[in-house]
Amino acid sequence: MSEPPIGPGMHWLLFGTAVFGSFAAYTAANRIFAPPPEGDESDLSKLAKKEVGTSSAFSSLNANGSLIDRLDLFLLKIFHLDVKLEEMHMMMGRPVKPAPLDMLHMKEFFAAGFGLGAFFLTGEWILIPFGVVGFLLPDSMFNGIIRTRQQAIMRNFPTMVDLMALTIEAGLDSMAAIERILKNISPDQRTELEKELEKMVNEIQLGYTRRDALQRLAMRTGISEVRSFVGLIIQSDELGTSLVELLRSYAADMRFRRLNKAEKLAAKAATKMLIPLFIFIFPTVFIMMLAPMMKSLVSGGLGF
């Protein structure tokens, strides 16, 4: 008894899955056999590896332990996820949950769910590699949390720069100005920006150099404006230049860019409103206008 032929829809689905699997296999092989990248030990990426590598969140995994531990270590080694997950966790603000190990388990859970779900729905073993999509899906969730946190930091950043300029103009240096500003804010009312500045001040008090503490601040936020701000302070410390006018100009420039961004978003609003208009408003208007005419036509003609 011959098997029924495969329909055109399933044929194209299998073809697309094969193409996607080929790209996934090539990417995996490229990551496995690619040599480790070389770079300057003083850049932020190397500094990040030193930061997150001091007490790894994956050090509790046992290579000879349970099957889950061995699977975790295998994925960390193959895809080099240890530093990446710890950097993402650091840019998320180091929440208690999810920890870097929890983030890895979420990726594994979504990968298993997508792969097995595709198999049980279609009965085709070839669709099990579809779990790669599930493995990558949590990254978008984590990046969304990071973007929300970065937006919260940037909301108060120009005001903080202005306060620093005023305090430095009164006679304090940059770090003393930050400490004075933080003292006037109660701990329960501090935003994400003030919490990061407090971490930087604590690192300096623990013995880190000002340059390293400032670079760690830029690394934890991942915001280009904060990196530029850090560069201004480091340049002022090394060259002995005045920081007040630089900070005022920088704050004014950030406000101008934020206003320009708001104007661009406002200009795009009219175009984005077309989608709900076509989906919700226009069909309702057409129904209200044409319903009486259609009712008269069905019941016996238009009457003229």
Image (spheres, grey):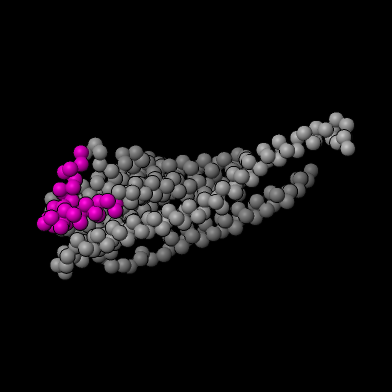
Q: Is residue 270 left or right of residue 148?
A: right
Query: Which residue shows up at 63% across the image and 41% down it?
Result: 281
Above or below: residue 135 compared with residue 218: above
Taking the spot 28% from the left edge, 43% from the top edge, the residue there is: 191
* Residue displayed at 22% across by 49% down: 197
Question: Which residue sits furthest bottom?
Answer: 239
Q: Residue furthest front?
A: 304
Visible in this render: residue 133? yes
**How many numbered badges does the structure rendering display?**
0
Segment colored magenta? 157-186
Q: Is residue 241 left or right of residue 161?
A: left
Of residues 96 and 35, the one drawn nearer to the viewer in this rendering: 96
Q: Would you say residue 171 sits in the magenta stretch?
A: yes
Q: In this view of the protein, which residue sits in the foreground, 192 or 77?
A: 192
For residue 37, which quarter of the picture? bottom left
**Residue 61, quarter of the rendered image:** top left
Which percent across, then down, holds residue 172?
A: 12, 55
Asked whether the viewer can see residue 55, the reply is: no
> In terms of secondary structure, what is the magenta stretch mainly?
helix
- Residue at the location (15% across, 57% down)? 169
Please determine whether, in this image, residue 34 is positioned above or below residue 264. Answer: below
